[in-house]
Image (cartoon, helix red, strand yellow):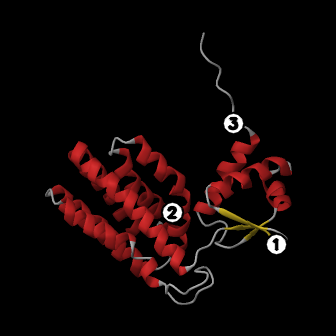
Amino acid sequence: MEEIERPPSLSDIATEKLRAAISEGEFALGEALSEQKLAERLNISKTPIRHALAQMKVEGLVEVFPQKGTFVFTLSGTDLERFSEYRFILETAALRLAFQRNRDGLVAELERIWHKMEEAKRIDKRSHYLDLDLQYHRAMFEFCDNHYLSESYRLIEAKVSAIRTYLGRDRIQTTKSFEEHGEMIEVLRKGRIDEAITILDFHLGRYHRTFSRDVVDIAKSETK
């Protein structure tokens, strides 16, 4: 007898939709979120919305302030730098393991994604390009063969995506980022993992270097 699969609950569905809306920039960094308006938008009661927001708080995608309400997360200049440092620690570990355990598979997958990014960039499909960018970095974890690392990254992936969507509006930055993706593939193909790590370090630090550490809220800053 096969086990019956449980259908997703309204709370699960609301969580998935809210997570996607934040990741894809449908809700801006720092934007206020109303339970009532979200419930009306999804045509459900406020209870699953409340559960979804609670989960988003655990994932760091929303912030709750007493007497003020619930808001999409935002970051200070220092927070962004610290978050980039954390990503670098995770991605460096994953990249080294993936390189050691399945170098050919990793390089082939990164190259496949990079060519798709090239096409998305050529035809100016920004949202598709950003999704491929996410896939590029996710590939390191898919090939590292360490589910603890993969799970750690999964917990911050939506936040990574939201930050990328917000900061990826600068076409010059996007072009430089794209070139760095290609450079990483080239040195990995030649077996130069330390050089790839150096490129990754510079690559992940690209966004936080555009903000001063004393910026209180990157969503409100004009200094980029």
Mark 3 surroundings: few (<14), some (14-19) or many (≥20) residues within 10 A: few
Label disc, if present, on residue 94 of the rendered structure: none
Residue 113: name its quadrant: bottom left
Q: Quadrant of the N terminus?
A: top right
Q: Is residue 108 left or right of residue 46?
A: left
Look at label 1 and name its amino acid.
Answer: Lys
Look at label 3 and name its amino acid.
Answer: Pro
Question: Which residue is situated farthest in the bottom direction here?
Answer: 223
For residue 124, say whether it is visible: no
144 up-or-down from 123: above or below: above
For residue 137, say whether it is visible: yes
To which residue does mark 2 refer? 160
Mark 1 surroundings: few (<14), some (14-19) or many (≥20) residues within 10 A: few
Question: Which residue is situated farthest in the left direction here?
Answer: 190
Front in this rendered view, residue 118 or 178: 178
Q: Which of marks 3 and 1 is nearer the N terminus?
A: 3
User: Who's the residue at 61% across and 56% down the image?
Assistant: 59
Q: Is mark 2 on a helix, strand or loop?
A: helix
How far is mark 2 from mark 1, CA to CA?
A: 26 Å
To which residue does mark 1 refer? 68
Residue 185, given in percent of the width and then of the height, sits at 24, 60
Q: Which of marks 2 and 3 is in front?
A: 2
Mark 2 surroundings: few (<14), some (14-19) or many (≥20) residues within 10 A: some
Q: Count the marks: how many?
A: 3
How far is mark 3 from mark 1, CA to CA?
A: 31 Å
Q: Is residue 69 left or right of residue 23?
A: right
Q: Earlier in the sequence, mark 2 or mark 1?
A: 1
To which residue does mark 3 refer? 8
Residue 224, given in percent of the width and then of the height, sits at 49, 86
Q: Which of marks 2 and 1 is in front?
A: 1
Look at label 2 and name its amino acid.
Answer: Val
How far is mark 2 from mark 3, CA to CA?
A: 25 Å
